[in-house]
Image: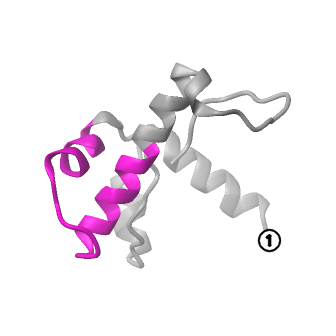
Amino acid sequence: MSFPLKLSKVEQTDSKSSYGIQLADLLIGGMIEHAMSEYGVKEKNDYNQTVVGLYGNKNLLTLLPNVDFEESRKERSNSDSFEFIEYISSNVK
């Protein structure tokens, strides 16, 4: 997953003091639960099954690994995640 942040520094914050951090905690926790429920590690519930719908293709690279790289490439061919993957693959060796 990626978040469209332009960070200049990072510091630890108690989520009780920031609504934005609380929201991020909920969304990230829900996505982790969703992935765990898909693999049978955690029981499926309304929250972990619907939270994935809050993320669009442009925000969600992948949480569930897929080794069929050509299929993944076709699925993401018109998205920001495709551009990101192409950039990383051509610049990181």
Q: Give the vertical position of 86 relative to 53 (above or below).
A: below
Segment colored magenta: 28-53
**64 and 76: which is toward the camera:** 64
Whether residue 68 sits left or right of residue 82 in the image: it is: left
Residue where numbered disc 1 is placed: 93
Vertical side of 22 occupied by 81: above or below: below
Question: Does the rendering let one see residue 44?
Answer: yes
The image position of residue 20, as x and y in percent, is: 54, 23
Give the residue drawn at x 41%, y 39%: 26
Residue lying at 20% horizontally and 43% vertically, measured from the top left: 50
- Name which residue type carries label 1: Lys
Disc 1, SS? loop
Q: Is residue 93 left or right of residue 80?
A: right
Q: Is 63 rendered above or below residue 30?
A: below
Tell me if 27 is positioned left or right of 46 in this view: right
Residue 13 locus on image (x, y percent): 70, 33
Give the main secondary structure, helix, strand or loop, of the magenta stretch: helix
Which residue is found at the position 80% from the left and 35% from the top?
11
Residue depicted at x 29% and y 45%: 52
- Residue 29's spot in the image, x, y percent? 42, 49
